[in-house]
Image (spheres, grey):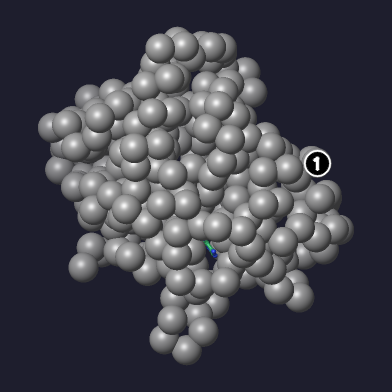
């Protein structure tokens, strides 16, 4: 990661965060992917607060954040693939779904028998989590269905006074949520494309990841699959080959010609990792700009392109 974070959290701030967590309150904190809205994962009362502040449906399970794989093993049944992936990518933007064990609020797992676990690669997150010495449930710190926050100001804009503490750890270096890989069944599944590419994950486990777009009967197995999500208030138009004067343009590589005054470049060198870092902040900025719609140039599926295209497809989906 080429971005520099503040390396230490102020001790008084950290103590404040830990006491709030122990008192079943919410604290927003930085990770390398997006900002998280954290609560004690063992407390129903604390976790219920996350759902209510975010207006998030209760059937949507949360990721449990921990400081070490030893702590992860308290909550998830470890296996060989988990060992390989954790060694390769933790701390980092990878979430592992394992059979649940240990004491966690049922709200975290939405009543299911699996749990999603991750060690974030941000010095402040790690410091907070190791001081807490347990699991912190944390979805992205935005209102349900909206664009994920990649800096403290976005959290303030999304959740403002609804939470007691927002810890500022700078801009997120990855900018996209973690990849969610399910290792609880016979075959590994990619529930959500994210900050570690499919190719990187497959290389480590030496096995293809099955497609995530699977539902069991009428039950949505990973509600990360909800269609409209990451949504600006303006319409989003994908694969743009032209851009009207009154549209904002999200460019990738050489920009298409436009008279619009609102052009944001995701990556002039057409690099998907750089584009991922800027994606959410750019969508948010164009959403605030005086434009009628957001036109987005085509982005290839290589590297983090799969995750970027996933988020863009949801941003463009019709809201219901
Ligand atoms: O990068 C991230 O993962 C961020 C930061 C804060 O760590 N967190 C995040 O959390 O994106 P959230 O709640 O917005 O997304 C959690 C994702 C959803 O797609 C959810 O469906 C999936 O993880 N998930 C959680 N538990 C699961 C489980 N037991 N089985 C399958 N999917 C699960
Ligand atoms: Mg989210």
Report the residue at 19% width, 47% height from top: 233
Report the residue at 49% width, 67% height from top: 222
Farthest bottom residue in view: 217
Q: Residues within 10 Å of mark 1 (few under 14, many from 20)?
A: few
User: Left or right: 127 with respect to 74?
Assistant: left
Q: Quadrant of the N terminus?
A: top right
Task: Report the number of numbered marks.
Answer: 1
Residue 112 higher or lower than 154, as above or below: below
Q: Percent from the top left, x then y, of residue 57?
A: 30, 64
Residue 267 higher or lower than 9, as above or below: below
Residue closest to the eye, 165 or 272: 165
Q: Percent from the top left, x then y, of residue 135?
A: 54, 44
Q: Which secondary structure lies at badge 1?
A: helix
- Residue 24 in view (yes/no): yes
Q: Percent from the top left, x then y, of residue 3?
A: 57, 17
Report the residue at 51% width, 26% height from top: 128
Report the residue at 83% width, 49% height from top: 84
Report which residue position mark 1 lands on: 87
Residue closest to the eye, 117 or 194: 117
User: Left or right: 109 with respect to 208?
Assistant: left
């Amino acid at each position: 990661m080429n971005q520099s974070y503040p390396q230490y959290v102020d001790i008084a701030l950290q103590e404040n965060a830990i006491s709030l967590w122990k008192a079943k309150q919410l604290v927003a904190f930085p990770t390398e992917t997006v900002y998280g809205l954290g609560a004690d994962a063992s407390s129903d009362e604390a976790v219920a607060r996350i759902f209510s502040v975010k207006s998030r449906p209760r059937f949507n399970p949360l990721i449990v954040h921990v400081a070490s794989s030893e702590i992860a093993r308290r909550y998830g049944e470890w296996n060989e693939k988990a060992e390989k992936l954790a060694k390769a990518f933790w701390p980092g933007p990878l979430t592992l779904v394992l059979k649940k064990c240990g004491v966690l609020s049922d709200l975290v797992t939405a009543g299911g028998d699996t749990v999603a676990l991750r060690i974030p690669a941000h010095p402040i997150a790690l410091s907070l989590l190791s001081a807490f010495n347990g699991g912190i449930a944390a979805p992205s710190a935005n209102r349900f269905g909206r664009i994920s926050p990649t800096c403290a100001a976005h959290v303030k804009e999304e959740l403002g006074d609804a939470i007691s503490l927002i810890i500022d750890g700078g801009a997120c270096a990855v900018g996209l949520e973690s990849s969610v890989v399910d290792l609880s069944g016979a075959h590994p599944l990619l529930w959500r494309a994210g900050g570690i590419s499919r190719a990187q994950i497959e290389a480590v486990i030496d096995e293809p990841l099955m497609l995530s777009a699977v539902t069991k009967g009428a039950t949505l197995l990973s509600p990360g699959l909800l269609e409209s999500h990451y949504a600006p208030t303006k319409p989003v138009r994908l694969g743009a080959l032209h851009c009207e004067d009154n549209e904002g343009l999200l460019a990738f590589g050489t920009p298409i010609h436009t008279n619009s005054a609102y052009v944001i470049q995701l990556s002039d060198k057409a690099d998907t990792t750089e584009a991922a870092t800027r994606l959410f902040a750019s969508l948010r900025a164009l959403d605030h700009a005086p434009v009628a719609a957001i036109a987005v140039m085509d982005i290839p599926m290589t590297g983090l392109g799969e995750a970027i295209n996933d988020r863009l497809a949801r941003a463009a989906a019709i809201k219901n």
